[in-house]
Amino acid sequence: MRIAINTRFLLSHKMEGFGWYTYEVVRRMVKNHPEHDFFFFFDRPFDEKFIFSENVTPIVLNPQARHPFLFYIWFEKSVTKALKKYDIDLFFSPDGYLSLKTDVPQINTIHDLNFEHNPEDLTWISQKYYRRFFPKFAKKAVHILTVSEFSKNDIIQTYGVDSSKITSVWNGASDAFQPIKEDKKNDVRDKYADGKEYFLFVGALSPRKNLKRLIHAFELFKQRHSEDETQLVIVGEELWRKANHGIEIDETIKYQIHFTGHIPLEQLANVMASAKLFTYVPYFEGFGIPLVEAMKCGTPILSGDQTSLPEVAGDAAIYCDPFNVEEIAQKMAELSLNPTLLNQLSENGLKRSKEFSWDTSAEKVWKVISNAL
């Protein structure tokens, strides 16, 4: 069979959520199924490392689709024509977007519906596009994949989709994330946190990641426990470009908050494994891959208690209300001052991390695709 895949988020210079999902799932699929022909649709020149096997044909479709107007042109015109030209039997879109003008069967992965619940988090044009077209994509798809039971139920309730049309498949995390020895942890602390223990945040820095409240909670924690030398390390490229992301930081603790910018995967894994506590309190999340990365490293977790996060973190986290700065600060103190609890969460996380595997994810995604074929 001839299967086309939207691979526009496979970007060699910067891999984010959609990109890693595409990479981990699609790489396994094409290697495990040499009996099928796969056509990768890129929207720009591609890196050869993403052509995972001989049964892959890469195709560049114009224009580069990084704006709602260009989304429309790319999916409704370029993709539609390519599906016909290459006689495609099925189109799989890991980032949720589909062509509404083709009769080729299509499967998409809708990761979450934050844009429906918090449209103010997006630009006006982006939220208008998503709220107009994603209900149509959900209707058009022969089957919908999503990444958590939370998101599955949200799609059912928000779009009125029958539950039999949606399959929930948990994400995995890279095997680069694993526990490391104390001497390596010391090297990481020297590089990123002035040699001190640190709380860590990792994530794409959109408003829903709730960074403003996290930083204010850290300020409260430091005001009340000035003897505690724990720092806060924040990994995120957008924050790096935009200085403090519009967040006012108390001058007395500013030197204890470290912005790293984007860092490569292997380095990020060491930063995660060296953290005293992974502090992750978004108010909306379809899954939260960094939670699994923390668990694989044995790093204790302070998590928000909203949306999919408890489903993913289970007993590997202590939970807080992400809208309550006071509570976040209290939980930081409770964990920072309780090594027994930190050790217990670490053990729980290492155990729970075994429930998340990209191999399993790819197998389940392929089962949905093969059933449609």
Image (spheres, grey):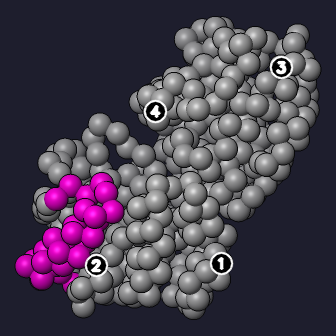
The residue that label 2 is drawn on is: 99
Q: Are marks 4 and 2 in contact (CB under 8 Å)?
A: no
The span from disc 4 to disc 3 (Cα, nearest Å) is 25 Å
For residue 301: magenta?
Answer: no
Q: Compare residues 77 and 37 and report the one nearer the observer.
A: 77
Determine the secondary structure under disc 1.
helix
- C-alpha distance separating marks 1 and 2: 24 Å
Label 4 vs 3, first from the N-terminus:
3
| Residue beneath disc 1 | 153
Query: Helix or strand or loop: what does disc 3 sit on?
Result: helix
Q: Between 89 and 347, which is closer to the camera in this rendering?
A: 89
The local secondary structure at tag 4 comes to: helix
Q: Residues within 10 Å of mark 2 (few under 14, many from 20)?
A: many
Name the amino acid, label 4: Glu
Image quarter for residue 299? top right
Amino acid type assigned to the residue bearing label 3 in the image:
Lys
Q: Which amino acid does label 2 sit on?
A: Ser
Nearer the camera: disc 4 or disc 1: 4
**Closer to us: 115 or 194:** 115
Where are the magenta residues, as a range? 63-89
